[in-house]
Image (cartoon, rainbow, N blue to C red):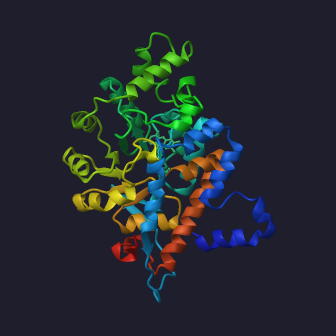
Amino acid sequence: MTLHSEDIQMNIYQCGDEAAKLLPVSFDEWEDRARKQLAAAPFGYVYGAAGSGDTHQGNVDAFQKYRLRPRVCCDTTKRDLSISIFGCKFPVPFLLAPIGVNTILHPEGELAPAKAAAKSGVPYILSNVSSISLEEVAKEMGESVRWFQLYPPKDHELTKSFLHRAEAAGFSAIVVTVDSTLLGWRETDLRNAYLPFLTGQGMGNYFTDPVFCSKLKESPEKNVKDAALKALEEGNNTCFTWKELDFIREHTRLPLLIKGITHSDDAIMALEHGVDGIIVSNHGGRQLDGAVSTLDSLPSICESIQNKIPVLMDSGIRRGADILKAIALGASAVLIGRPYAYAMAVAGEIGVREVINHLIAETELQLAISGRSSIQDVDKTLIIKVK
Ligand code: FNR
């Protein structure tokens, strides 16, 4: 993919007064537009976090502890944002994070980010609780890179079925999310009495699964609420332990990543249990209130992993500077979450593409202005801790 950061930038400048009518540029503007466009409950579902919201805020604040320290007089005419993970070259150092139940944000649901990702060459991680089935998403994405995220079900047969379906549909890695065996205490959703799954949204993979459907007393068409409750019960997998992770490891030939790690001892355990990648994440502050920020967790995790497997991170990434800081602290790549969810709510596929393009342009400009020409040149020497 050819990157044209200056072109993107100049296009915006040259729009003049028209610029005001265009789509937003900054994260705050996207969030603001989404707030105005969406009903309170779906907006709150994306915006909301666990308990006091401290973890969510802490994720964002943590980036202020570090400053970029640029070098000058370096030739940065040619720039390379590409990275390699599992032997695959990706054009930019970010992926779209798994975000479920997208039909509450846009009628196209997960097809909107899937198409935007495919057109930009950015890998898309499809959520287990997508409203659109993984097969439909795969069909729309053609040969483009996609990973499948799994909330490990209690039922081993269902686990095998999801893994098998993802492999058959051309997903090239499995991301097991382990920080959400129970839903966090989300006060916005409680206040709005809003759990979209109960009306069948976010059930695209469950309601099309032969194993899942074979265990229902009544079909989802007849009794959507009971079917949804059964799916939620599968996901409330509080018995999930490392042994269960071994089961998943044994039943997929795909690279396996574990998402939701913030403790270096867990990173070591995950490595010992055969994962191929770690995603440092606290679910965007939606699970454990008062938890450590992911940027604060990242250095010790990278230290314990010693480059044996890729360490990715998410939670709080809003702009190019954040991406560079995370990479400087040892991340191989980052995941973008809320920024694309808000953009999808505002303008569907076009909105997500806009966010992707702006992030690419901003990251590339940041890289060059900090005196580096390649993501490979980004290391600890680029940042300084100030707090
Ligand atoms: C999420 N996230 C998430 N993670 C996951 O593994 N499976 C999922 O289905 C979802 N669904 C989901 C819905 C919504 C509305 C949000 C905001 C988040 C967490 C997501 O993958 C990622 O970890 C966070 O979004 C990162 O935090 P920020 O950067 O978005 O604040």
> In the drawing, does residue 190 fall left or right of residue 177?
right
Q: Is residue 90 above or below residue 157?
A: below
Can you say which quadrant of the picture contains the C terminus? bottom left
Q: Is residue 23 above or below residue 66?
A: above
Q: Can residue 190 be seen in this view?
A: yes
Tell which of 190 and 204 is nearer to you.
Answer: 190
Tell which of 289 and 257 is nearer to you.
Answer: 289
**Which residue is drawn at the image coordinates 64% and 40% (left, top)?**
106
* Coordinates of residue 55 in the picture (x, y in percent): 43, 50
> In the drawing, does residue 338 fall left or right of residue 173?
right
**Which residue is drawn at the image coordinates 75% and 72% (left, top)?**
14
Seen from this angle, which residue lies furthest top?
217
* Coordinates of residue 44 in the picture (x, y in percent): 59, 40
> In the drawing, does residue 159 fall left or right of residue 121?
left
Q: Is residue 103 above or below residue 8?
A: above
Seen from this angle, which residue lies furthest bottom?
73
> In the drawing, does residue 316 fall left or right of residue 380?
right
| Quadrant of the rendered image containing residue 172 | top left
**Which residue is drawn at the image coordinates 52% and 81% (left, top)?**
77
* Coordinates of residue 266 in the picture (x, y in percent): 25, 47
Tell which of 48 and 75 is nearer to you.
Answer: 48
* Coordinates of residue 375 in the picture (x, y in percent): 42, 70
Seen from this angle, which residue lies furthest right?
17
